[in-house]
Image (tube, rainbow, N blue to C red):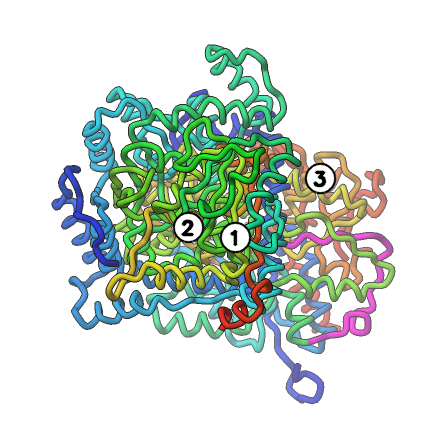
Amino acid sequence: MANDKSKTPINVGLFATCLVDLFRPTVGFAAARLIEAAGCAVHVPEQTCCGQPAYNSGDSRHARQIARQVIESFEIYDYVVVPSGSCGGMIAVHYPDLFADDPDWNRRARALAAKTFELTTFLADVMKIDAAEAISAAHDGTATYHDACAGLRELGVRDQPRELLAGVKDLALVEMDDTEACCGFGGTFCVKYGEISTDIVSRKTAEVVKTGADLLLAGDLGCLLNIAGRLKREGSSVQVRHVAEVLAGMTGEVPPIGEIGSERGGENNGKKDGN
Amino acid sequence: MSDNKSGPKNGPKTNNAGRAAILGAIRQSLGRPELSTDAKRGLNEHIAKHRANLVPARGKGDRAALIKRFREMAEAVSCTVETVADAAHLPAAVADYLRANNLPTQVTLAPDEWLAGLDWEGQSLLETKSGAAGIDDLVSVTPAFAGVAETGTLVALSGAGHPTTLNFVPDYHVVALPTSQIVGAYEEVWAKLRKANKVGRGFTMPRNVNMITGPSRTADIALTIELGAHGPRSLHIVLIDDETAGETDGETEQA
Amino acid sequence: MEFMKPGAFKDNARAALADQDLRSAMTMLSTGMIPNRQGAVDRLPEFEKLSQRGRELKDHVLAHLDFYLERFERNCKAAGGHVHWCATAEDARREVLEICRSVDAKTVTKGKSMIAEEIHLNEFLEQHHIEPIETDLGEYIIQLAEEPPSHIIGPAIHKTKDQVSDLFLKHHAKLGRTERQTEPQKLVNEAREILRQKYFDADVGITGANYLIAETGSSIIVTNEGNGDLTQTLPKIHIVVTSLEKVVPTLEDATTFLRILARSATGQEFSAYTTISTGPRQDGDMDGPEEYHVILLDNGRSAMLGSEVQDMLRCIRCGACMNHCPVYQSVGGHTYGTVYVGPMGAVLSPALLGVAETKHLPCASTLCGRCEEVCPVSIPLPRLLRQWRQRAFEAGDVPSLERWGLSVWAFFAKRPWLYGLGARLAMRGLAYLGRDRGRMRKLWFAGGWTDGRDLPAPEGQTFQERWRKQQRERAAS
């Protein structure tokens, strides 16, 4: 918004999320590249998790302890950007609820919530970047986009990723039926109720395959691990990536989720290491 | 409401203990005693004014638009609709409809003064009787209190002239509706009802207000919609054009 | 088929997932109901506003529930009806029985009523030698099958057409119907013909109520088949079994709900029959019941007022939440082991039956939020599910392994340095395990995941590890 003329850079705290930190560092780097392309300075303070597993399990005490830690680490930045609608929603929607009975922390939680954005909404709605110009990424293929639930319903992430993807050269986007249906991940749900979760994700993969797309994209790593895990178990060749990887033009830097090497069947690429 | 009844007959006694316990529990949960007279006055006013909340645009329009919408909406829920120029044509229209669709011609008429006043004897095909519906009755002809354009809904009031069973027991239901009875939205029916049944400062409700939107249907077997589940298999509406016929009358009535 | 308790949710789910008939029935539900509702909502531009107004009205009524119930009672009595206040299910069953006995009832016809299910009325009447006859086609089917409803508006939604054909042949053969019908139209007709005489023979007709109107003392039923009207018009006595929160102030207020109910439930503009009933038959009436009784059930609802789950009392029982629920779509209603199923059931059941008994239900949700999105009275179902989870956690009703796991996880999450160390080690280990394929097919400690899915391998180093390294290199250069 106000980035062009102002002298002081916009400082963005990148909350990578624990899943990205652990499983898919490239998404963190992709997010950083995109935020920088939008003209901001990226900071990655020491971080662990947003506390959602505890919150959704009814363990508010631990959830609050972790939330305080996140608030303390991130409230110094102009914005907090999260490459996940789920963790972004935790901070932007649920943190204030966690401190409903604690006026001081509630105030701080609300202040943080107000400046916390999911990655694609930050790029499209806050920084209003022109994807084609600012990013100039290319990816030859046909993708379909899964609307991850928390981002969609808690933060209104729907058009932003699609607008940004429209700026990616050579990429065609096809919509799957019922794209707003849950993939069955649900945090600890997918392990506690593994069989139900598998059934739900099978409906999702059926829709993905039906589109004929060769690439599935979404903005939440939890959903992506789930859908990729199921697609691979089904023997599908559809590749799976976080939307940030494609937008940042980093698909060459890391194999698709749950795969190894850039060529399918190229199992002997041996060691791969991010950079 | 005014009390039009002699009060409960020899039914079971009111469970006073349950009543006190429930009202007490409600007040305890809400964290307050019984409402004050002042607070009650506001709520009484809400009831007394019975304001419409929000009437959709599709419930509004000029006469022609509303009649057209009523017809379209009714047809969309599998009613058949025809229009006759005046009430005198109704018996012939009923006879023609039954003949054309190969339906039984023994007809039970609502014991309604207006309906009974028409020339049914003139239709040699029809065998008519009047009264409530019995288990073997296959065709009924009834009036309606109103038609509602927003969903093609007929509104029937139970009463001496309109036994409720006629709406549900026979296999085939024919409803005669003067177009002047068509309104845009449900709220207009309540206004009409309050006026028609006015008693003192209140009004009485008939035992049944039946809002009927198409013939009986079910989707309980494999989500397939089938007509004629327990009520009528078909619903035929004969609109009687009483608005354009006597033009001057019609216009003053609309005002 | 036996129906297990809500405590057996996981076992029930496993059985449901293996039931091919159920799976084909449930597929039709999600492919049919979701677009139907969306179409109806899209055709009425004012839907959102109506829904907002409905929500406000319900909140208004709940805040003044005592007033509106007393007003309802007064007007119901003025019209010649009786009102029975019943604090518990047991009270309600007793009142119904007493009324039935006053006319020596042999058979009772029943329209669809979730309150009757809630108080397990059929079983009770049978114990007292009164035959309850379900007349809603879906209810009739499950009564023959001796099953509870699996959906609040489509009780037999879990049954395929073939199962209905078998069921009808089995039960109707003794009535001379020895031909197995396979067309839905013929099946519907068969039930129609068999039930017809029963409407006329019944001594008492029992229906539920979608709404009670304080202004007029009336009850409203919204149906499609016409069975509810035959049920309440033909017998000597009409009993309405309903609950406290169904009351609305005026006809106009009821109208607002009528505009959103069918659209949310079945995607119809309006259900075929919306019937407002007030008192018994009146002077001059040629039909209608001689007595009209309203059973007003509390059964835990008054205790929900003022609590964290009060919002649940806004529910208008449209079923949209379950139609759109991914878990319900997978396992169907019987898996829940409760009368109310799906998201609304998972929130309501703990209030009615206790948290300990039903602790699985609030947990068996992905919290995807689609239920709240389609709820016409904006009940924050995910939030309420979390409330119950919190209650269960605080009450110690959480398996010790899960509690222990959360504590260990929280221990690390609160100590970034330890977390970083553990994460680096663990991710290297996992990456090593997945080095050949980029994923793992089997992981002993993650069976819940790997039984049905591969686990994608991590890249190896953590993001923070690499980021700091990169920052150091940048600073050095």
Residue at 59% over, 60% down = B67
Task: Give the amino acid type for the residue marked by disc 3 in the picture.
Answer: Ala
Observer-side mark, 2 or 1, equals 1
| Mark 2 lies on residue | C316
Where's residue B59, x and y in %? 54, 64
Q: Do callouts 2 and 1 mark residues in contact (Cβ within 8 Å)?
A: no
Asked if one can make out residue A103 in the rendered structure from this viewpoint, the answer is: yes
Q: Nearer the viewer, residue C333 or A216?
A: C333
Residue B117's x, y, as percent? 45, 48
Chain label for disc 2:
C
Q: Is residue C353 left or right of residue C145?
A: left
Question: Does B150 sit above or below residue C238?
Answer: below
Residue identified by numbered label 3: A206
In which quadrant will I find the N terminus of chain B?
Answer: bottom left
How many marks on residues?
Answer: 3
Q: Is residue C314 left or right of residue B16?
A: right
Q: Residue at x 38, y 65 (%)?
A: A99
Do dots 3 and 1 share one subunit? no
- Mark 3 nearby-residue class (10 Å; few <14, some 14–19, many ≥20): few
Residue at 28% across / 52% down in the picture? Answer: C217
Q: Amino acid at mark 1?
A: Leu
Name the residue: 56% across, 32% down. B105
Q: According to the image, label 1 marks what residue? A: B177
The spot of residue C398 in percent (x, y) is 37, 41
Segment tinted magenta in the rendering: A128-148
